[in-house]
Amino acid sequence: MTIRFDGRVAIVTGAGNGLGRAHALGLASRGAKVVVNDFGGARDGTGGSLTPAEAVVEEIRKAGGEAMADGADVSNYEQVKAMVAKATEKWGSVDLLCANAGILRDKSFAKMETSDFAKVLDVHLTGTFYCCKAVWDGMRARNYGRIVVTTSSSGLYGNFGQANYGAAKTGMIGLMNVLAEEGRKTDIRVNMISPTAATRMTEELLPPQALALMRPEAITPAVLFMLSENAPTRTIMGAGAGSFAVIKILETEGINLPPSEWTPDAVAAHFAEIGDMSTAKALEGAFQQTQKYVAQAAAKAGVKL
């Protein structure tokens, strides 16, 4: 089966360079009409120019595809709405969204300014919300939508000096989980990519021989799969250097303690059993956790539910 996007309209944010550029070119090469969005700022979010987005549009057009450039700042909801309206007016819909735009303002937590924390959350987390919100009603009306948002191992697993970036990227997991549930009845599928690649954001962190293996184009196959018609939903994929993985948040089975043992001492005494990862599984929704705990308590108390 060949995945194609003929007749589909895609928005890719942060598409003037790096990962976003690779995703935009990949979508266009498989038939999508692409809005190449890029604010055109520096890595820390300052400045701004439409030139990077226009250069990618020119690449797409020279290859026979259709694209338009847009310089919306994803942290400005009015600009994001205008971008979606422009694409819808020109091409009739927005079917696919890849929320990729981001900035870095790395500092250790002790030295981090509150403004740098707020700005990174504003671009990554709030900006992703704005993009999803702006396309949501149209996707619901057409009973079709595919959204991929971008997380990071810095949030999933932790990375020194990135409290702002890690918090923003992990916050997106909650957004994805909820949107995937709310989008099911109208065939809106929402997934997440955790990429590692040689980009402006990583070029100073890795040696040249590692960067050579980590081309942005190695991430795009996972993104395009999760934007395709037969995509899963509520899935986190890791990708880098040609490797692909699925990432899950797991919870151990745990144990139920009687009221007489509702003490921190009892939790400490039983912690090895509580934390036994051999029993861990991924839960499919918030209420599933509640049901599990209630069932354990009822079994312990001899109560039939």
Image (cartoon, helix red, strand yellow):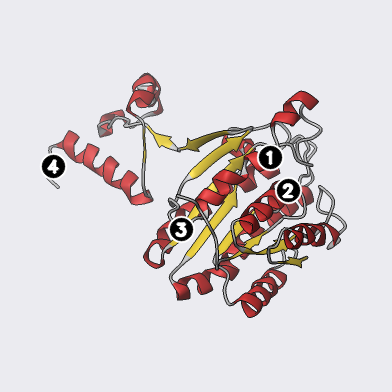
Query: How far is mark 3 from mark 4, CA to CA?
Result: 46 Å
Residue 234 location in percent, x, y? 45, 50
Q: Residues within 10 Å of mark 1 (few under 14, many from 20)?
A: many
Q: Residues within 10 Å of mark 4 (few under 14, many from 20)?
A: few
Q: Are marks 4 and 1 in contact (CB under 8 Å)?
A: no
- The tag earlier along the polypeptide, 3 or 4, is 3
What's the mark number on residue 117?
2
What's the mark number on residue 210?
none
Secondary structure, mark 3, is loop
Q: Which residue is mark 1?
A: 163
Query: How far is mark 2 from mark 1, CA to CA?
Result: 8 Å
Q: Are marks 2 and 1 in contact (CB under 8 Å)?
A: yes
Secondary structure, mark 2, is helix
- The tag earlier along the polypeptide, 4 or 2, is 2
Q: What is the three-letter code of the residue carrying label 1?
A: Ala
Report if residue 266 is visible in the image: no
Does 285 sit left or right of 259 as displayed?
right
Comparing 56 with 73, the one in front is 56
Q: What is the three-letter code of the residue carrying label 2?
A: Phe
Q: Nearer the viewer, mark 1 or mark 3?
A: 3
Q: Which residue is mark 4?
A: 303
What's the mark number on residue 229?
3
Comparing 285 with 131, the one in front is 131
Q: Residues within 10 Å of mark 3 (few under 14, many from 20)?
A: some
Report if residue 19 is visible in the image: yes
Residue 109 location in percent, x, y? 73, 36
Secondary structure, mark 4, is loop
Q: What is the three-letter code of the residue carrying label 4?
A: Val
Q: Nearer the viewer, mark 3 or mark 2?
A: 3
Where on the picture, by quarter, is residue 161? top right
- The tag earlier along the polypeptide, 1 or 3, is 1
